[in-house]
């Protein structure tokens, strides 16, 4: 198979790359010529403990197959250290794959502050810290690719994952704004919502399906999004089991009321069919497009 997508002069940070999806991403980036910073704290799936061997093993795998990589064992909540490590070892950073994650599943009724906070800290603050530390370097060199790891649990909701869903959809909000802020410096920012058979999903997915959902079936999308060839930004992609698709916002045509008169809850009830009906729906791509319909309503009744 030809490999036209190459990273020979590029440095890629993959967080949480000591196992699961991150390991598969790191191995594939390395196979395509990248110098890879394999970050992993090596804790449990619930965010307890630390163990250097997870990242070290993946680095050994990469080196054995002729690739270039270093291990980093810092928590993503200390993202500046990870980026500094990349700069010290390889002199630059081009791609950041924010992949590290944990679960603290509990129904909302049983959710404790510690579960809420830790999930926020690893997924959101961690991704923020790593990306924020890399950002000035990406801007300076007028090149960068950033990938955030969202989840269908954030997009659609999932019982027992209020903390995780909050964090995962938060990362898509971050993606959308960083895509706008990064564009003029050729920094493209995308998010994935993966499904893979890893320790995180073991026991949650039926064993026969788990076997088929190989982490390696997520990484080709991540490597593509991390490449120069990819020119799209602000996207959200569901990926897993050998399938990839793009997700976008959809909004109904809605109902307009006379802003001079105001409107009542009963008016809302009477128009509910139009408000909640997606026939002929719009797909606003940005804030300006999103506000057009509201502005049109103001104009409709102006004067
Ligand atoms: N597996 C799935 O189906 C699935 C679905 C949706 C989203 N995700 C997301 O994909 C990412 C990878 O998950 P996975 O399934 O490979 O799970 P995993 O547990 O195998 O991998 C996560 C890795 O992140 C590391 N990590 C945790 N906290 C860290 C920290 N503070 N600093 C550095 N590293 C840390 C862990 O040690 C682990 O190696 C996560 O963000 C997860 O939320 C996975």
Image: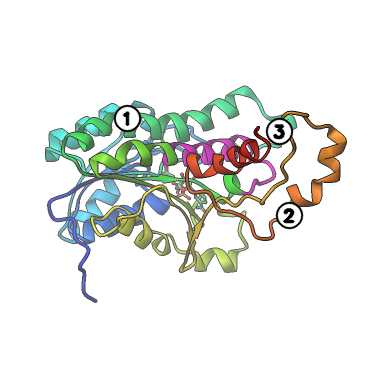
Observer-side mark, 1 or 3, equals 1
Q: Which residue is mark 1?
A: 132
Residue at image coords 41%, 47%:
234
Q: Please, is residue 256 above or below residue 30 in the view?
A: above
Q: Residue 250: percent from the left, percent from the top?
A: 60, 52
Secondary structure at badge 3 equals helix
- For label 2, count other residues whose C-alpha is less than 10 Å away and answer few (under 14), some (14-19) or many (20+): few
From the Cβ of disc 3, is ligand 1 less than 8 Å away? no
Secondary structure at badge 1 equals helix
Q: Is residue 263 left or right of residue 303?
A: right
Specify the color scheme: rainbow
Q: Is residue 296 left or right of residue 147?
A: right
Say whether marks 1 and 3 touch (CB < 8 Å). Answer: no
Distance from disc 3 to disc 2, alpha carbons, whole Å, reads 30 Å
Distance from disc 2 to disc 1, alpha carbons, whole Å, reads 40 Å
Is 172 one of the magenta-colored residues?
yes
Task: Identify the mark at residue 277; answer none if there is no mark.
Answer: 2
Q: Which residues are magenta?
A: 156-175
Say whether marks 3 and 2 touch (CB < 8 Å). Answer: no
Q: Is residue 252 left or right of residue 164?
A: right
Q: Main secondary structure of the magenta part?
A: helix
Distance from disc 1 to disc 3, alpha carbons, whole Å, reads 31 Å
Task: Identify the mark at residue 108; answer none if there is no mark.
Answer: 3
Residue at image coords 55%, 25%:
117
Q: Residue 168: percent from the left, percent from the top?
A: 52, 41
Q: Please, is residue 231 above or below residue 117 in the view?
A: below
How many numbered discs? 3
Residue at image coords 85%, 42%:
269
Quadrant of res 297 = top right
């Amino acid at each position: 198979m030809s490999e036209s997508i190459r990273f020979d002069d590029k440095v890629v940070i993959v967080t949480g790359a000591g196992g699961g999806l991150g390991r598969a991403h790191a191995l594939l980036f390395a196979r395509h010529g990248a110098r890879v910073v394999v970050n992993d704290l090596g804790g449990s799936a619930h965010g307890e403990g630390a163990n250097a061997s997870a990242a070290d093993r993946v680095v050994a795998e990469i080196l054995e197959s002729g690739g270039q990589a270093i291990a980093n064992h810092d928590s993503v909540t200390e993202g500046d250290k990870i980026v500094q490590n990349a700069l010290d070892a390889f002199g630059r950073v081009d791609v950041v794959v924010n992949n590290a994650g944990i679960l603290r599943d509990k129904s909302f009724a049983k959710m404790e502050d510690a579960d809420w906070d830790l999930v926020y800290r690893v997924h959101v603050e961690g991704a923020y810290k790593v990306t924020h530390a890399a950002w000035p370097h990406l801007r300076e060199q007028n090149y960068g690719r950033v990938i955030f790891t969202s989840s269908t649990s954030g997009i659609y909701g999932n019982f027992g994952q209020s903390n995780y869903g909050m964090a995962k959809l938060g990362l898509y909000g971050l993606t959308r704004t960083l895509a706008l802020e990064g564009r003029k410096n050729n920094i493209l920012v995308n998010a994935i919502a993966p499904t893979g058979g890893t320790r995180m999903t073991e026991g949650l997915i039926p064993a026969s399906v788990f076997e088929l959902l190989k982490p390696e079936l997520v990484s080709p999308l991540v490597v593509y999004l991390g490449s120069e060839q990819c020119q799209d930004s602000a996207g959200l992609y569901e990926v897993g089991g050998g399938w990839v698709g793009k997700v976008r916002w959809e909004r109904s045509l809605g109902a307009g009321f006379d802003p001079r008169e105001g409107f009542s809850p009963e008016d809302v009830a009477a128009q509910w069919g139009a408000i909640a009906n997606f026939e002929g729906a719009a797909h606003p791509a940005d804030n300006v497009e999103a506000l057009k319909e509201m502005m049109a309503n103001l104009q409709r009744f102006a004067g």
